[in-house]
C-alpha cells in the first residue's frame, strides 16, 4: 500500500510571529481514515491551508501520493479535495452552478460536470436544492454543499476541516455515513476535529496535535488503551534498594525511596498494594502523575460530550 | 493539467465573469450607456453647435471616440476590481486556489471578463452615438488595437487594485483619484493643441492622452500624438501590469498568508 500523504518537518510562522506549526511529521496511508485531533488554535487549519495552497509554509516537505507538492503543486492538487472550516462559496450562486464551476476549474467540461454535479447533490441530500442560491440554504446544507463540491474531481484524498463543528446530531450522523461509504470505496480521508468521540467513531488512525506539534500518532485503539493506564508516584517508608519489584506491573525506580508504577484500567489499587506488600514495600503516600497527553485528552473528551 | 484542461478552466472562469455582468446589466451595462448619452446630448447637440470645429471636425464627432474610450477604461477596470475583490472578500477565490491552476489562468479569467465588459460597453456607447452623428472609420485595425489594448491595461490594473485592497472603499480609490482626473485631462473634450505650452507638456505625461488620441486617430485620422507612441505605451503598461500581478500572486499577496 502506498502513502497518501507524507509530511516532513512542516512549519509555519505567520507574519505576526505566531508559530502555528513547529516541525510537523505526519504519514497517512492510502485508504486510511485518519483523524487530526487537537483543540482550537492547535494548528489544524494551518496544516490544511498549506496542503491546499491557501497558506504558504515556512519550511518543510509534502508528498501527496508520492508527488512532491513543492515541485509539482498543481499535480498534487489534482489528487485532493478539501472541505474548509468556513463557508467559502459565492453565496449568490446556485448550488449546481457552484459545483459545475469548481469542476470546470479542474478541467472537467460542462457537459460532463452537469450530470456529475447532479449526482453528487442527490447523494448529499441536496437534490431539491440544486437550483437554489447558496445563501438560501441552511447551515447544514451549506456544509453538505461544500462536501459535494470537494468531490467533483473524484479526489483520491479528501480533507475535511472540522466538518461537523456546530452541526446538529442528525446531520453529523448523515455526514459520517457518507464519509464511511466513501472511505470503503477507496477514498483516503483526513478529518480534523476537536471531538475525540468523532475520531473514535470514524477513524482508524489518529494524530494528536497541540501548539503546532504532533504529540502522538497511531491506531486509535492503541492510543485509547494506553490512556487507560494510570501512572502513580509512590513514596516508600524505606529505600527499595536491593528489593525485588512486583513483576505484574510496570514499575520504575526514580530514587531509592520513590517508585513510579503503571496501573492498567480494570485493576484496583488494593491489588497494587497487595503486590507491593508481597515484595516487602510499604507505601507512605501516592499521587497520580499528571500527563500532558492525558490532560489534553481529558480536555478533548470532555468537550466531545454533548 | 494539460492544455485542454487549462482551456476548460479558463473558459469556465470567463463564462462566470461574463454571466455575472450580463445578469446584473442594470448595474453594469446600463449606467455607462445612460451617462454617455447625456454627454452626447449636452456637449454634442446643445453646446456642440456653439463650439468651434476642432481639427476640422464637429465637436460631437471629436468627442465620441474619447467618450467611448472613457467607458472602456472605467468598465474594464471596475468589472475586475469589484468581481475579484468580492471573490476575495467572500473567500470564493479559494475555489480557484485549491484547483490545479497556474496563477496566470486566474489573471486571464478575470482580466478577460473585464475586457469583454469594457469592449461591450464601448460598443454600446458607440451605437448610441449613431443617433447624434454617423460614425466613420479612418483605420479600423487601429481602432480595434486601441480598444483591445486599453481594455487589457485597465482590466489588469483592476486586478492589481483588487489584490491589494483591504476594504470595498479601496477599490474606488483608483477610479476616483486617478482614472477620472486623468481621463478628463486626457484630451477627451479638447485637443491639447488648444492648451498653453506648460499644460500641453504636462498633459503628455498622462498615459490616457495617448490612448484617447490613438483611438480617435483610428476614427478621424487626426491626432495630437503619433499613433505608435500610444500603442507602445499601452503595450508597455500591459506588460508591466502582467508582471506586477503575476509577481504579487507568486508572493502570495492578498491571497495566501
Ligand atoms: N492568518 C493568520 N495570521 C496569524 N495567525 C494566525 C492566522 N491563522 C491562524 N493563526 C494562528 O495560528 C494558530 C493556529 O491556528 P489554526 O491553524 O487556525 O488552529 P486550529 O485550526 O487547530 O484551531 C492560532 O494561534 C491562530 O491564532
Ligand atoms: Mg481550525
Image (cartoon, helix red, strand yellow):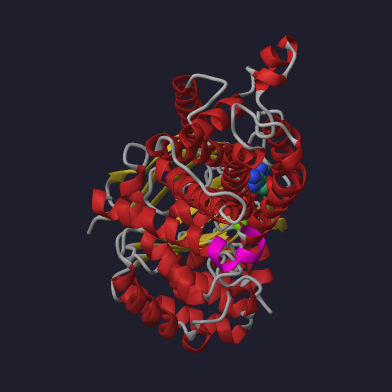
- Which quadrant holds the C terminus of chain A? bottom right
User: Which x, y percent locates residue A164?
Assistant: 58, 73
Q: Main secondary structure of the magenta part?
A: helix
Viewer-closest of A21 and A122: A122
Residue B22 colored magenta?
Answer: yes
User: Which x, y percent locates residue A149?
Assistant: 45, 69
Number of on-image labels: 0
Q: Residue at coordinates 28% horizontally, 52% vertically from top-left?
A: A65
User: Which x, y percent locates residue A21?
Assistant: 56, 42
Residue A169 colored magenta?
Answer: no
Q: A101 left or right of A283? A: left
**Is B133 situated above or below B225?**
below
Image quadrant in which you'd find residue A9: top left
Q: Is residue A256 visible?
A: no
- Which quadrant holds the N terminus of chain A? bottom left
User: Which x, y percent locates residue B157?
Assistant: 57, 36
Image quadrant in which you'd find residue B143: top left
Residue lying at the far left in this picture: please name it: A1
Viewer-closest of B129 and B52: B52
Residue lying at the far top in this picture: please name it: B197
Highlighted magenta segment, given as a residue range: B21-28
Q: Is residue B31 visible?
A: yes
Q: B36 left or right of A54? A: right
**Is B239 situated above or below B33?**
above
**Is B161 situated above or below B227?**
below
**Is B232 situated above or below A203?**
above
Amino acid at each position: 500500500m502506498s502513502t497518501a500523504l507524507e509530511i516532513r518537518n512542516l512549519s509555519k510562522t505567520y507574519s505576526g510571529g505566531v508559530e502555528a506549526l513547529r516541525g510537523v511529521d505526519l504519514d497517512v496511508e492510502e485508504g486510511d481514515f485518519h483523524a487530526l485531533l487537537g483543540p482550537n488554535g492547535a494548528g489544524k487549519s494551518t496544516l490544511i491551508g498549506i496542503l491546499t495552497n491557501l497558506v504558504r509554509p515556512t519550511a518543510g516537505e509534502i508528498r501527496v501520493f508520492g508527488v512532491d507538492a513543492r515541485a509539482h503543486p498543481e499535480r498534487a492538487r489534482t489528487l485532493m479535495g478539501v472541505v474548509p472550516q468556513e463557508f467559502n462559496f459565492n453565496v449568490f450562486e446556485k448550488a449546481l452552478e457552484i459545483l459545475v464551476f469548481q469542476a470546470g476549474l479542474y478541467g472537467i467540461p460542462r457537459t460532463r460536470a452537469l450530470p456529475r454535479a447532479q449526482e453528487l447533490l442527490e447523494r448529499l441530500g441536496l437534490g431539491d436544492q440544486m437550483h437554489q442560491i447558496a445563501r438560501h440554504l441552511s447551515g447544514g446544507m451549506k456544509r453538505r454543499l461544500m462536501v459535494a463540491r470537494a468531490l467533483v474531481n473524484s479526489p483520491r484524498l479528501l480533507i475535511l476541516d472540522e466538518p461537523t463543528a456546530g452541526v446538529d446530531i442528525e446531520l453529523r450522523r448523515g455526514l459520517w455515513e457518507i464519509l464511511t461509504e466513501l472511505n470503503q470505496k477507496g477514498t483516503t480521508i483526513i478529518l480534523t476535529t476537536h471531538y475525540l468521540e468523532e475520531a473514535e467513531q470514524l477513524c482508524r488512525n489518529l494524530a494528536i496535535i497541540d501548539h503546532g506539534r504532533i504529540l502522538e500518532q497511531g491506531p486509535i485503539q492503541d492510543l485509547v488503551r494506553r490512556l487507560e493506564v494510570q501512572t502513580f508516584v509512590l513514596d516508600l517508608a524505606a529505600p527499595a534498594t536491593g528489593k525485588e519489584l512486583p513483576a505484574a506491573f510496570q514499575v520504575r525506580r526514580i530514587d531509592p525511596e520513590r517508585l513510579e508504577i503503571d496501573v492498567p484500567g480494570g485493576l484496583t489499587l488494593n491489588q497494587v498494594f497487595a503486590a507491593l506488600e508481597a515484595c516487602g514495600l510499604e507505601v507512605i503516600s501516592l499521587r497520580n502523575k499528571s500527563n500532558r497527553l492525558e490532560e489534553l485528552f481529558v480536555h478533548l473528551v470532555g468537550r466531545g460530550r454533548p | 493539467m494539460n492544455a485542454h484542461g487549462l482551456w476548460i478552466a479558463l473558459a469556465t472562469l470567463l463564462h462566470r465573469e461574463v454571466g455575472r455582468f450580463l445578469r446584473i446589466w442594470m448595474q453594469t451595462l446600463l449606467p455607462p450607456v445612460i451617462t454617455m448619452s447625456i454627454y452626447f446630448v449636452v456637449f454634442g447637440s446643445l453646446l456642440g453647435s456653439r463650439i468651434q470645429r476642432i481639427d476640422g471636425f464637429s465637436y460631437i464627432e471629436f468627442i465620441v471616440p474619447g467618450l467611448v474610450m472613457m467607458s472602456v477604461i472605467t468598465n474594464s477596470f471596475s468589472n475586475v476590481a469589484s468581481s475579484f475583490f468580492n471573490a476575495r472578500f467572500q473567500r470564493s477565490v479559494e475555489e480557484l486556489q485549491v484547483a490545479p491552476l497556474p496563477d496566470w489562468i486566474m489573471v486571464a479569467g478575470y482580466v478577460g471578463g473585464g475586457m469583454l465588459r469594457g469592449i461591450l460597453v464601448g460598443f454600446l456607447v458607440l451605437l448610441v452615438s449613431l443617433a447624434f452623428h454617423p460614425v466613420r472609420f479612418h483605420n479600423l485595425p487601429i481602432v480595434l488595437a486601441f480598444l483591445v489594448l486599453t481594455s487589457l491595461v485597465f482590466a489588469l490594473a483592476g486586478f492589481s487594485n483588487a489584490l491589494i485592497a483591504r476594504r470595498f472603499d479601496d477599490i474606488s480609490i483608483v477610479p476616483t483619484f486617478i482614472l477620472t482626473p486623468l481621463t478628463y485631462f486626457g484630451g477627451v473634450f479638447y485637443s491639447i493643441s488648444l492648451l498653453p505650452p506648460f499644460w500641453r507638456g504636462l498633459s503628455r505625461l498622462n498615459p490616457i492622452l495617448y490612448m484617447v488620441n490613438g483611438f480617435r486617430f483610428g476614427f478621424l485620422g487626426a491626432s495630437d500624438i503619433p499613433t505608435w507612441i500610444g500603442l507602445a505605451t499601452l503595450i508597455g503598461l500591459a506588460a508591466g501590469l502582467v508582471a506586477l500581478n503575476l509577481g504579487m500572486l507568486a508572493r502570495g499577496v492578498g491571497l495566501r498568508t
